[in-house]
Amino acid sequence: MADAGKESDICEIEDALSILQSENDLLRQENEKLSQQAEGAAAANAHAAELMAELEDRNEQLRTEIENREYLETELRKFNEQMERRIKDRTAKLRALNKHLEKEIAEHAKAEQLLKARTEQAIGHQSILLKLATIEREDLASTLKGITEEASETLDVERVGIWFFNEDRSEIVCEDLYNRGAGEHETGQRLRACDYPRYFEAMEKSRIIAAHDAQRSVHTREFTKEYLTPQGIMSMLDVPIRTHGTVVGVLCHEHMGPAREWTLEEQEFAGSVADLISLKLEASERKKAEEALEKLNRELSSTVEELSRSNRQLRDFVHIAAHDLKTPLRGIGTLADWISMDYGDKFDEQGREQVRLLAARVKRMDRLINSMLEYSRIVRNNAREQEVSLSELVSELIKDIEVPSNIEIILEEDLPKIVCERGHLERVFWNLLSNAVKYMDKREGRIRVGCVDEEGFWKFSVSDNGCGIEPRHFERIFKIYQTLSDRAGPENIGVGLTVAKKIIELYNGKIWVESRPGEGSTFFFTLGKGQK
């Protein structure tokens, strides 16, 4: 019984142990679960700590943002207050500006109206000036009357006058004074410079004398007692009239009634009218000069025609006279030869000398007649002109002239080519070279031909070291039939230099001589480069 009880107790104990073991296992499992839960709680706590830290950071950021926002709101309020003040100021300024713009717009509109009125006035003035410029009257006086009438109407003045200086400039004389009210023109009034010195001085120095109150203006108040007050004139607009830079008169505009302020447009119009009068005066002078020139040209043409006719008649007379003189001269020469041959042995020496002298005189007379014919034939004919090489021409002449062995002719440099009649220049150089040879008195003679290029012309020279010429004969040697000696014998008739002078002058040149007795002479002559 006792064993059975013990076994029963053991079984119970074993059952209890088994139950305890099961509970221990459950506890262990529960502990493991708790450990796992504890670990989860620890992790959750750690995560919660992290979240708390993040939350604190976020709170800090929020606090900072709130503080910043409060600062920004404060600044925004300040900015809004400033903007409100600026808007108020700007609004006030805009209101003031609007008022100013409205004023400017009104003034601009007024200025536009004024400009339009001035433009219309200027166009009207230009139209009147154009009309005045095209006025074609019979004479200057009628033209001036038309100008005073138009100026009076355009500027709405009662009186317009044109005055001119007299010859000694001691006074101005009224050429035309138009009175619009009466529709009448006056003339002949005079104002002396000695009575109104300031006004006359102003005329010389001023472009325009605009006297708004003529009785007080320093330039016009001299007229008050004798002219302005009696005529009722209160304002004057006067413009000096100038031609070729000299004041020759004055254009006067005289306003009656209240004092008048002359506008710039009115002053410019008055100045233009005065300039127009100047042009009319110059045109009148030019027309008179052209008429005088035309008359002079007609007279000159008639004179030239008469001179040409006289020259032709003179040439014809020379040819006829030469023929009429040569016919008996040849008879005298032939008779002298017959007498010399038939009766020469019957004459004594004096008789034979007289016969020889007669024959020499006949030959000299024949040369004189021939030279007269030659001189009369020297005319310029453009149809016979050609380009001539003067170097070749002079070289050929040197070969043809009988030059003694003791004389040398030197062509110093190339001479230019000239458009001329070859025969004319041949005569010039032949006469100059032959004279130089003829009057050479040195054992070693030198004759030089040269040319210098001057501005606009050629200057030729023929120089020698011969006997020379006294200055008192410089002009005489170029006159026909004038000789300085009989050195060259009876054939020296004094025509060569006269012919040369006439030829050079035909080509608008000149010829002269420079010389010293005993040292030689140099003959110069010029020809224009237009002949080249």
Image: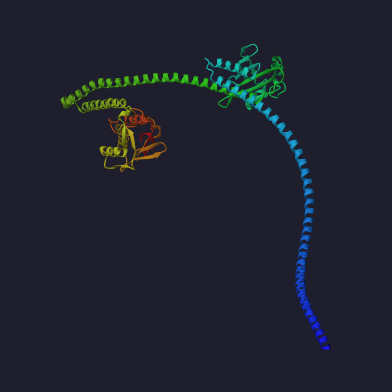
336 left or right, relative to 1: left
In the displayed orientation, state which residue is furthest to the right.
2
The quadrant holding residue 97 is top right
For the N terminus, the image quarter is bottom right
Closest to the observer: 177 or 501? Answer: 177
Is residue 253 positioned above or below 430 on the image?
Answer: above
Asked if one can make out residue 248 in the rendered structure from this viewpoint, the answer is: no
The quadrant holding residue 39 is bottom right
528 left or right, relative to 177: left
What's the residue at 34%, 35% (across, down)?
Answer: 418
Asked if one can make out residue 327 in the rendered structure from this viewpoint, the answer is: yes
The quadrant holding residue 316 is top left
In the displayed orientation, state which residue is furthest to the front.
1
For the C terminus, the image quarter is top left
Tell me residue 276's x, y (percent): 57, 22
Number of residue marks: 0
Tell me residue 120's x, y (percent): 62, 23
Colouring scheme applied when the structure was drawn: rainbow
Closest to the observer: 308 or 152? Answer: 152
Tell me residue 428's x, y (percent): 32, 33
Is residue 52 positioned above or below 279 on the image?
Answer: below
Is residue 163 positioned above or below 17 on the image?
Answer: above
Closest to the observer: 397 or 282? Answer: 282
Tell me residue 63's x, y (percent): 79, 58
Closest to the observer: 322 or 80? Answer: 80
